[in-house]
Image: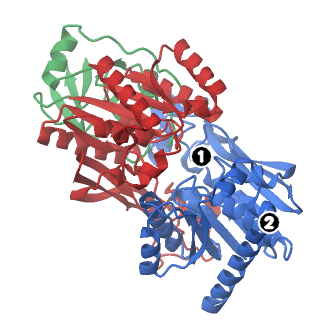
């Protein structure tokens, strides 16, 4: 079994569109959406949920009012404004650091884990899917990504799939580290903007640290050909293989509305580029 | 009065609504504008503010005096974020993991830990079209956006109509921008993706108890799923912005709608009057 | 000498768990006595690699055999002088045999910055 992971550094570069195209073109695979902040691969897939469960992520301070003597020590040490003038703890502002727990003279505060979201597995028109959903105000973590990956690997075993396709998290933090480890190949999707190039440099360092084969795709390359050229120059210097360039295609959002992928339309310029990128990837990754 | 403009994801037209609302209302009442989308602020493109002063927003990072340190490991044990590690006769601080809560300094039995400020970003204050304008700018590579939004909110004048352009998504920064508002205007598109993101945004606004109005942007491109959802949930659709080539052209050139098309000035005023009247009827404007 | 192998179970025949920071178990193997001890890993939402490095160093391991090690964990292990061997596959027994046969190459220093979140 071989796994391929899609990463982008910054969000909104078209990472999920390309992952969706690969999902459509690739055979004998399991899909995994580790972009749990904004999981939306499933919107293209008509999923039918088969199993689900809770995810406990962050912790929050919980106060036992019966033991509280209103001394205000907790409020004094909290740097996140999470404790109001009446010494109530706001769960959305609480970072779960435990400083209030430490200073409370009556042990009225404890840190307790909270349910931050849920994971699920589903059958879809393009194959089995493992994904997750976060609740409002919750942030993703390597812990949740690892959980989704475990579910995806179990699906791979069940259906004896040859390939695992993972839509990764944006950024370069903990969730990305958790998704990179164990991947066989990473496709970096970037767009021609200065922040796109900056993020590409950072994400490549992470991927290289894990010694995973990395490939580059430049999306909407014709929106700013000057920066696209800079990105290609960077790729050449870093010996990062460019799988292809996708032109800006205003028809793509319309196809998304219809629940369709650009590669399903033989007329689409973006779809044609994605097909070529897929073919090249299958050739070089073996 | 405080109105936050938000959306479950980027690119829905949130900034279009926020900037035009501000411009349309500024003639009749004191308005102030806060761009809380600290990772990708772009309201300045339409409002062209003159920045007068800036303020740095910092977090405090621990630094260990190894001459005093006994390597007892209390700091590492206390840190909920694993941002400080004691390994053998070495202490390592992971600046990227640190939330700046200060607990390690509190628990250190020998006073070996001090704290140094580290800049997360800056707040810019200025004037745009005659009204106060402020925005946050998160430094590249920083992950903690929420402290910037809290700092921005500190500058709200209670006698003005404050318009907050929220960061997209459903995480802590978005919640910070919505929390405390009298009204959240959620901007979406009439598509399955728009509906998916709207549901998430509604969840966020409801979790902090803020009344909601929905604005459908690019009306006419999709289906009626968003309308059916709003009807089922009892959420008013307070404005529709049609999918229109002229509107798209103005946007790409950074020209506010209300400047080029005067009928939109009246529409945004009407939007404000009807929604605030509705709020006043329901539970009184704060 | 004590070495640590990351594994999905507690026995010699269990498979390697390739992700150091979020491995299910740390198995400590004494190359002289051939004693094997398992320590379960229950990482939190953040900083799993840092936590794992402290567990491994705290248990006195001089080398780690695993699939991959993130930048934060790498920094911690390097500070403790723990040797890092990555790219291990198969079972715990395979990894120990390969280690004894000198088949692993040591991981280079950490590349790039650490990561937050």
Q: Which residue is at the far top?
A: C102
Q: Disc 2 vs disc 1: which is toward the camera?
A: 2
| Lateral position of residue A80 relative to residue B233, left or right | right
- Residue A37 seen: no
- Quadrant position of the C terminus of chain A in the picture: top left
B237 vs B177, nearest the viewer: B237
Query: Which element carries disc 1, helix, strand or loop?
Result: helix
Tell me, what colour scheme is on the image?
by chain
Residue sitting at 60 percent across and 30 percent down?
A198
- Residue at x 64%, y 92% (from the top left corner): B281
Q: Colour of chain B?
A: blue
Residue A222 placement: quadrant:
top right
Image position, residue A33 (x, y; %): 34, 45
Residue beneath label 2, please?
B23
Identify residue for label 1: B105
Residue furthest out toward the front: A267
Residue B93, can we see it?
yes
Q: Nearer the viewer, residue A165 or A246?
A: A246
The chain coloured green is C
**Picture coordinates of residue B266 (x, y %)?**
76, 75
**In 3D space, how far apart are the residues under numbered discs 2 and 1 (Cα atoms)?**
48 Å
- Same chain under badges 2 and 1? The reply is yes
Q: For residue B160, which quarter of the picture? A: bottom right
The chain in red: A
Closer to the chain start, of discs 2 and 1, is 2
Is the residue marked by circle 2 packed among few (<14), some (14-19), or many (20+) residues within 10 Å? many
Label 2's element?
A: helix
Q: Disc 2: which chain?
A: B
């Amino acid at each position: 079994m071989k796994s391929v992971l899609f990463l982008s550094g910054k969000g909104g570069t078209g990472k999920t569109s390309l992952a969706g195209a690969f999902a459509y073109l690739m055979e004998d695979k399991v899909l995994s959406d580790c972009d749990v902040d904004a999981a939306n691969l499933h919107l293209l897939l008509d999923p039918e949920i088969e199993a689900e469960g809770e995810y406990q992520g962050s912790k929050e301070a919980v106060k036992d009012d019966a033991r509280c003597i209103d001394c205000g020590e907790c409020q004094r040490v909290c740097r996140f404004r999470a404790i109001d003038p009446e010494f109530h703890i706001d769960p959305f502002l609480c970072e779960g650091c435990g400083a209030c727990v430490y200073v409370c003279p009556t042990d009225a505060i404890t840190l307790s884990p909270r349910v931050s979201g849920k994971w699920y597995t589903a059958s879809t028109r393009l194959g089995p899917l493992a994904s997750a959903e976060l609740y409002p105000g919750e942030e993703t973590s390597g812990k949740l990504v690892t959980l989704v990956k475990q579910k995806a690997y179990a699906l791979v075993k069940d259906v004896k799939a040859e390939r695992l396709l993972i839509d990764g998290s944006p950024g370069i933090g903990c969730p990305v580290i958790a998704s990179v480890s164990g991947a066989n190949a990473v496709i970096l999707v970037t767009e021609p903007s200065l922040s796109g190039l900056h993020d590409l440099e950072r994400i490549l360092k992470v991927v290289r640290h894990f010694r995973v084969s990395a490939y580059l795709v430049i999306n909407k390359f014709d929106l700013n050909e000057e920066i696209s050229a800079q990105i290609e120059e960077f790729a050449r210097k870093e010996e990062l293989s460019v799988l292809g360039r996708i032109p800006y295609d205003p028809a793509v959002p319309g196809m998304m509305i219809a629940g369709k992928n650009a590669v399903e339309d033989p007329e689409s310029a973006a779809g044609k580029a994605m097909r070529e990128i897929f073919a090249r990837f299958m050739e070089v990754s073996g | 009065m405080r109105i936050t403009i938000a959306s479950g994801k980027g690119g829905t037209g949130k900034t279009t609504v926020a900037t035009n609302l501000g411009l349309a209302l500024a003639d009749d009442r004191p308005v102030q504008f806060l761009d809380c989308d600290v990772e990708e602020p772009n309201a300045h493109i339409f409002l062209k503010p003159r920045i007068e002063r800036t303020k740095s927003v910092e977090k405090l990072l621990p630094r260990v005096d190894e001459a005093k340190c006994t390597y007892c490991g209390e700091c590492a044990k206390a840190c909920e974020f694993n941002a400080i590690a004691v390994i053998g006769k070495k202490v390592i601080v992971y600046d990227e993991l640190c939330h700046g809560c200060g607990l390690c300094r509190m628990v250190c039995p020998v006073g070996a830990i001090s704290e140094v400020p580290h800049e997360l970003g800056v707040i810019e204050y200025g004037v745009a079209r005659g009204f106060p304008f402020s925005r946050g700018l998160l430094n590249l590579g920083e992950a903690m956006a929420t402290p910037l939004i809290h700092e921005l909110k500190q500058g709200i004048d209670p006698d003005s109509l404050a318009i907050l352009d929220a960061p997209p998504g459903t995480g802590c920064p978005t919640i910070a921008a919505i929390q405390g508002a009298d009204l959240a205007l959620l901007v979406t598109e009439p598509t399955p993706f728009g509906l998916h993101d709207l549901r998430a945004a509604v969840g966020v606004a409801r979790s902090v108890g803020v009344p909601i109005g929905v604005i459908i942007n690019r009306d006419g491109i999709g289906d009626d799923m968003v309308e059916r959802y709003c009807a089922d949930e009892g959420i008013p659709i307070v404005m529709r912005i049609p999918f229109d080539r002229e509107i798209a052209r103005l946007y790409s050139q950074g020209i506010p709608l209300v400047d080029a098309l005067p009928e939109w000035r009246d529409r945004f005023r009407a939007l404000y009057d009807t929604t605030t009247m509705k709020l006043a009827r329901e539970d009184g404007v704060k | 000498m004590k070495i640590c192998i990351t594994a999905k179970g507690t026995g010699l025949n269990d498979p390697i768990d390739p992700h150091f920071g979020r491995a299910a178990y740390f198995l400590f193997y004494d190359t002289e006595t051939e004693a094997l001890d398992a320590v379960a890993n229950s990482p939190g939402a953040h900083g799993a690699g840092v936590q794992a490095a402290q567990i491994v160093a705290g248990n006195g391991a001089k080398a780690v055999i695993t699939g991959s090690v993130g930048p934060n964990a790498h920094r911690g292990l390097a500070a403790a002088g723990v040797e890092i061997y990555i790219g291990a596959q198969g079972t715990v027994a395979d990894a120990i045999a390969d280690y004894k046969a000198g088949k692993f190459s040591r991981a280079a220093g950490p590349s790039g910055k650490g990561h937050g979140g």
